[in-house]
Image: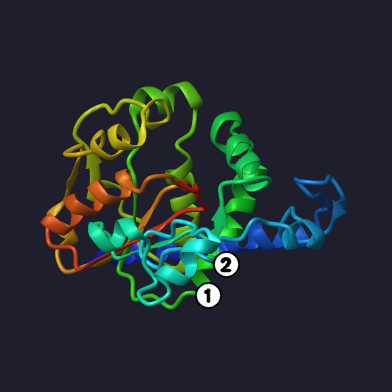
């Protein structure tokens, strides 16, 4: 019991310290990460660049794939894209507020491959906004596990870095051990759409603790939705009640 109380207290202290760290940006001048305009705000993005972010407004309500104008009317009766109508994925929804286009793609690249923490904190703020505006019943935050050799090469696993901090902002329990990889995956970037869909099949295992839980599953980008689908399959097979995917961006088909 004492151990549990100590963990709760430690987590509360972490939350307060992290929030203080974020608010300290008001007194520490920065600059917009897109246009380099000087700023004195909590986030490194000016109002003009914020207004020009590529919003993913017209999208499938299940997988968040952007819908071309010609398909919006066709899907309006269900809110689903043709793929989700034919073969619904294992997850319950995708929250991906931005398109994988400039400048969001540049921010993700600088954070993921160049370890630019300022870009990471800006993406964190955008994800926090997306969750804050979407009422959800959540029990825990989990993350798509990374490949060890790629983490060593990059020096950072972007989804885990974001998940640790988002959990503090949201007051959620971050459970990195509840979803694990069972094998090394071929990079999705090297594969076509069909191969991308099958590549992560059977590549994940979930802990028994997920049973009956409403889970938020974080990844940085959703492209085909294959990784999110097969990770959700593993979580649902262990009894997870709901799996909602959160990503900074969605790549158009």
x and y percentages locating residue 99 in the rendered image: 56, 52
Label 1 neighbour load within 10 Å: few <14, some 14-19, many 20+: few
Q: Which of 71 and 67 lies nearest the eye of the viewer?
A: 71
Q: Badges 2 and 1: C-beta atoms under 8 Å apart?
A: yes
**Left or right, residue 111 beside residue 243:** right
Q: Which of 38 and 16 lies nearest the eye of the viewer?
A: 38
**Left or right, residue 97 beside residue 182:** right
Judging by the rendered image, the residue that carries numbered circle 1 is: 133
Label 2 neighbour load within 10 Å: few <14, some 14-19, many 20+: few
x and y percentages locating residue 226 in the rendered image: 31, 45
Task: Tell me which residue sits at (41%, 48%) in the image.
Answer: 219
x and y percentages locating residue 231 in the rendered image: 25, 48
Alpha-carbon distance for marks 2 and 1? 6 Å
Judging by the rendered image, the residue that carries numbered circle 2 is: 129
Task: Tell me which residue sits at (36%, 28%) in the image.
Answer: 191
Quadrant housing residue 192 = top left
The numbered dot on residue 77 is none
x and y percentages locating residue 229 in the rendered image: 27, 50
Quadrant housing residue 42 = bottom right
Q: Which of 213 and 21 lies nearest the eye of the viewer?
A: 213
Q: Is residue 144 above or below residue 55?
A: above
Task: Tell me which residue sits at (12%, 62%) in the image.
Answer: 239
């Amino acid at each position: 019991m004492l151990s549990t109380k100590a963990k709760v207290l430690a987590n509360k202290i972490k939350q307060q310290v992290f929030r203080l760290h974020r608010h300290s940006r008001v007194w520490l001048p920065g600059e917009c990460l897109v246009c380099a305009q000087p700023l004195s705000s909590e986030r490194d993005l000016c109002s003009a660049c914020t207004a020009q972010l590529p919003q993913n407004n017209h999208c499938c309500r299940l997988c968040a794939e952007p819908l071309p104008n010609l398909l919006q009317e066709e899907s309006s009766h269900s809110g689903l894209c043709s793929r989700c109508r034919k073969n619904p994925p294992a997850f319950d929804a995708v929250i991906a507020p931005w398109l994988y286009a400039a400048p969001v793609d540049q921010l993700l690249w600088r954070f993921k491959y160049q370890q630019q923490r300022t870009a990471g904190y800006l993406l964190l703020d955008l994800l926090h906004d997306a969750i804050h505006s979407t009422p959800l019943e959540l029990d825990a935050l989990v993350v798509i596990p990374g490949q060890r050799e790629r983490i060593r090469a990059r020096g950072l696993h972007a989804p885990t870095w974001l998940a640790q901090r988002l959990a503090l902002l949201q007051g959620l329990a971050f459970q990195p051990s509840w979803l694990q990889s069972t094998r090394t995956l071929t990079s999705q970037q090297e594969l076509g759409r069909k191969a991308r869909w099958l590549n992560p099949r059977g590549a994940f295992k979930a802990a028994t603790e997920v049973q009956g839980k409403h889970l938020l599953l974080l990844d940085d980008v959703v492209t085909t939705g294959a990784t999110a689908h097969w990770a959700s399959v593993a979580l649902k097979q262990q009894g997870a009640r709901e799996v909602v995917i959160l990503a900074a961006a969605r790549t158009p088909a």
